[in-house]
Image (cartoon, rainbow, N blue to C red):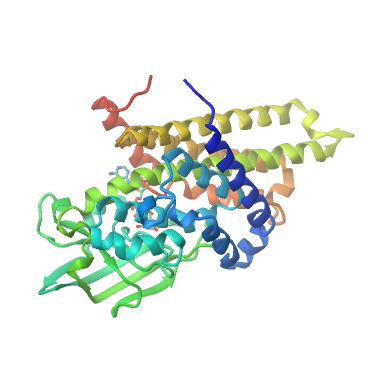
């Protein structure tokens, strides 16, 4: 067994680290609190080719292996998790198009998505259906050479920049089971009837917008049906979400690492009773636990990423997403405790880590739902746990 990154991965991680330390860390707190869009950081990510991490090389992307993919999200989330959101659903949608799109769709969109000239996201959740995606109500009715789409989407990250946005719809609302009547349509920005109606106010995950979208008689050409065949949408989405769970596990490691780093630094600076608080055993217990949990989470995230390399790995990615996201939240809370009263101050980084960490247990499948996914995969003996 090899628990080390290889040389290319180490060099890539160092490059990312440098970018994050120079371009994200110095501005994160101020921009996050001001609700400012991180335009300059987006430009930097374009320059590094990061919008193409899941795009095949033949379409101009980096086509990263899943472990290198995880490194991107770990490092960026260490600086500011909201920035990872700008790349996250973009990368999943690129992967969905790469894996399932027709050749025409790939050629039309992937080269521009790889450079960030075009951006994207993923439109699944609705006001009345999140976990239960088969319960969505958005319909696409075929009329000649186009679909007429009606419905609403909720919580769609990158909605104001996405062009095209892959949208999960029901092409056959009467199908049973429902997933057999579900498809994904690539809807271009500016199509009449497609309207981003609201930026949803959020506790954290700022920097990127999460929006409500209204679809009112939107005419979408049949050529925009992903893969060109109806009824495959749910499978297409689920295969992309697997990388999504690696992405969330890795973001969680980044948050936890930062919580650890902030606690370690603060504990050595802050004095009480005439000595650094790091001399106190009660603080050392927290630091020791933080370091242990962060490293365990990191190994779990890389392990799950590695499992994806060899095909579908619902159990491994589910386990990693659950474990890492819960480590992130606990790490943020423990780091706040090490900071005492200052941990509660918006003038310190750690309160943002706390706000951002909570989302990690919700996005890409809530942890409770994923526990059931892991259980099913254990029952089917799909997961290698030894
Ligand atoms: C900031 C943010 C950004 C997001 N970005 C996107 C995006 O870009 N695109 C997108 O499509 N979606 C996005 N989402 C939506 C996200 O994926 C959903 O919120 C998530 O899947 C949960 O769905 P829900 O909110 O409808 O909760 P619900 O499905 O209503 O779940 C509510 C509770 O019930 C539990 N529950 C539900 N069903 C079961 C069951 N069968 N067994 C046991 N427990 C159950 C859940 O675990 C949860 O605790 C985003 C959400 C947030 C908060």
**Residue 295's spot in the image, x, y percent?**
57, 30
Q: Relative to residue 53, is residue 266 depicted above or below?
A: above
Position of 380 compared to 30: left or right?
left
**Residue 331's spot in the image, x, y percent?**
59, 38
Residue at horizontal 20%, vertical 58%?
Answer: 183
**Residue 137's spot in the image, x, y percent?**
22, 63
The answer to whether residue 227 of the structure is visible from this angle is yes
Position of 159 compared to 35: left or right?
left
Residue at the limit of the structure toward the front, as seen here = 58
Residue at horizontal 42%, vertical 40%?
Answer: 66
Q: Relative to residue 297, is residue 266 depicted above or below?
A: below
**Residue 188's spot in the image, x, y percent?**
32, 71
Q: Relative to residue 53, is residue 32 depicted above or below?
A: below
The answer to whether residue 337 of the structure is visible from this angle is no
Residue at horizontal 36%, vertical 36%?
Answer: 308
The front one of 309 and 62 is 62
Location of the C terminus by quadrant is top left
The front one of 72 and 179 is 72
Residue at horizontal 41%, vertical 56%?
Answer: 60
Residue at the limit of the structure toward the right, as seen here = 274
The front one of 75 and 379 is 75
Q: So how many labels did they put on this image?
A: 0
């Amino acid at each position: 067994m090899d628990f080390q990154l290889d040389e290319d991965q180490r060099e890539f991680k160092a490059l990312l680290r440098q970018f994050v330390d120079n371009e994200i860390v110095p501005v994160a707190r101020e921009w996050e609190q001001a609700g400012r869009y991180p335009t300059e950081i987006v430009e930097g990510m374009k320059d590094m080719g990061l919008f193409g991490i899941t795009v095949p090389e033949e379409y101009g992307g980096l086509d990263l292996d899943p472990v290198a993919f995880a490194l991107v999200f770990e490092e960026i989330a260490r600086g500011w998790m909201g920035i990872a959101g700008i790349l996250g659903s973009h990368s999943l949608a690129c992967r969905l198009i790469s894996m399932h799109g027709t050749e025409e769709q790939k050629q039309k969109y992937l080269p521009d998505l790889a450079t960030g000239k075009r951006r994207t996201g993923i439109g699944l959740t609705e006001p009345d259906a999140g976990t239960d995606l088969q319960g969505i109500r958005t319909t696409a009715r075929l009329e000649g050479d186009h679909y007429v789409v009606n419905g609403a989407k909720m919580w769609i990250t990158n909605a104001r920049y996405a062009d095209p946005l892959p949208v999960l719809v029901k092409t056959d609302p009467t199908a049973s089971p429902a997933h057999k009547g579900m498809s994904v349509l690539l809807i271009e920005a500016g199509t009449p009837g497609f309207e981003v109606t609201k930026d949803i106010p959020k506790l954290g995950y700022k920097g990127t917008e999460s929006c409500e979208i209204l679809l009112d008689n939107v005419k979408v050409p049949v050529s925009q049906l992903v893969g060109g065949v109806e009824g495959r949408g749910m499978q297409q989405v689920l295969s992309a979400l697997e990388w999504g769970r690696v992405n969330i596990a890795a973001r969680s490691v980044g948050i936890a690492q930062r919580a650890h780093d902030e606690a370690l630094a603060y504990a050595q600076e802050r004095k009480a009773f005439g000595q650094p608080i790091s001399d106190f055993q009660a603080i050392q217990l927290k630091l020791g636990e933080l370091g242990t949990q962060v490293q365990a989470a990191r190994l779990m995230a890389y392990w799950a990423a590695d499992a994806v390399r060899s095909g579908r790995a619902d159990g491994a990615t589910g386990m990693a997403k659950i474990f890492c996201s819960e480590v992130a939240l606990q790490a943020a809370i423990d780091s706040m405790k090490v900071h005492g009263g200052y941990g509660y101050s918006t003038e310190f980084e750690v309160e943002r880590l706390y706000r951002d960490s909570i989302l990690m247990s919700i996005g890409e499948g809530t942890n409770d739902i994923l526990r059931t996914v892991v259980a099913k995969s254990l029952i089917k003996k799909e997961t290698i746990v030894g």
